[in-house]
Image (spheres, rainbow, N blue to C red):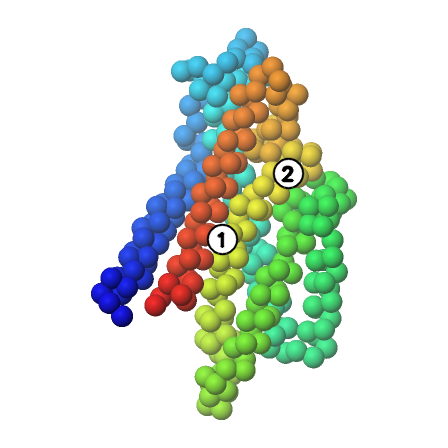
């Protein structure tokens, strides 16, 4: 192999690391910025001023104002906390629950595996958003209920991945050696199984952040998520959708925020997937 061929994997790896640093930094800015969103708002996001209702974008109000004269930029900024942290809580929850169920099924097998996998099959048989709509409607809406509704339909994917990876690791030679050495079940799972199945689960979770964010916004848009006057991007789009033809900037502002956030997290997920791809290690 010539020197140029050897340099290619190294250049690819360095490029992926730079890309990861860029998108990880952007994602961190979004997360940290949303946490301090109330301090970053130029105006009170809930203060009404009917004298400037439906004002066009200007230097004073870059995203204009809504029908109650509330500054849209401030509402978009403060709404990031609800939208982003609800999404992260949802993804962490379904990842942990799905991984635990998958490891239990893959490790124990037999009847428990059959029962839990048939339950996951039932959940997977439903269209995700339709099932979440039904659950959220029964529970009465609200951000918390929207998170629970989406979590109820989303965990089986992680359970399937964790189960298949656990079964593969369980039959490996190093696991047999660890069992013969007298390792306890807890130590086998925590020290050997979990670290070796984390990669695929982490990539799936990273790629799921954008999807879950859009689905949470979708539930709020349909009136089954955050309730006004709580600032949340999907709810804000729903509240202003009848102004789309006359004052489009009011609806575009939270829409752009969703677009940019989903794009950043999706690109970060793609980069993590490429970094963990064994072909890029060569």
Q: Residue at x 64, y 38 (%)?
A: 218
Judging depth in this view, the residue of 85 and 200 nearest the camera is: 200
Judging depth in this view, the residue of 49 and 8 nearest the camera is: 8
Image height of 52 relative to 218, above or below: above
Q: Residue at x 69, y 79 (%)?
A: 110
Q: Are marks 1 and 2 in contact (CB under 8 Å)?
A: no
Q: Residue furthest bottom?
A: 180
Q: Residue at x 58, y 65 (%)?
A: 161
Identify the residue under disc 1: 206
Q: Residue at x 69, y 34 (%)?
A: 223
Q: Residue furthest top?
A: 51
Q: From the top left corner, tell me how far across and down residue 121 is, in percent.
A: 72, 63
Which image quadrant: the C terminus? Answer: bottom left
Residue 212 shown left or right of residue 44 in the figure: right
Identify the residue under disc 2: 218
Image height of 259 relative to 130, above or below: above
């Amino acid at each position: 192999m010539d020197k140029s061929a050897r340099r290619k994997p190294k250049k690819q790896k360095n490029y992926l690391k730079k890309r990861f640093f860029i998108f990880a930094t952007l994602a961190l800015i979004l997360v940290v910025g949303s946490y301090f969103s109330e301090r970053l708002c130029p105006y009170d996001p809930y203060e009404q001023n009917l004298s400037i209702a439906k004002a066009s974008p200007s230097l004073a109000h870059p995203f204009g104002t809504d029908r109650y004269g509330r500054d849209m930029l401030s509402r978009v900024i403060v709404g990031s906390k609800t939208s982003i942290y609800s999404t992260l809580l949802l993804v962490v929850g379904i990842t942990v629950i799905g991984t635990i169920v998958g490891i239990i099924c893959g490790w124990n097998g037999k009847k428990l595996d059959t029962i839990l996998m048939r339950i996951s099959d039932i959940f997977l048989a439903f269209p995700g958003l339709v099932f979440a709509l039904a659950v959220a409607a029964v529970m009465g809406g609200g951000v918390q209920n929207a998170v629970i509704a989406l979590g109820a339909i989303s965990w089986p994917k992680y359970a399937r991945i964790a189960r298949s990876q656990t079964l593969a690791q369980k039959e490996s030679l190093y696991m047999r050696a660890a069992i013969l050495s007298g390792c306890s079940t807890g130590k086998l799972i925590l020290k050997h199984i979990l670290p070796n199945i984390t990669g695929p689960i982490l990539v799936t979770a990273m790629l799921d952040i954008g999807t879950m964010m859009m689905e949470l916004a979708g539930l709020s848009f349909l009136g089954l998520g955050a309730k006004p006057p709580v600032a949340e991007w999907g709810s804000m789009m729903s509240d202003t959708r009848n102004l789309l033809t006359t004052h489009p900037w009011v609806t575009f502002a939270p829409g752009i925020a969703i677009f940019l956030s989903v794009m950043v997290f999706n690109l970060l997920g793609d980069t993590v997937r490429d970094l963990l791809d064994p072909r890029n290690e060569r």
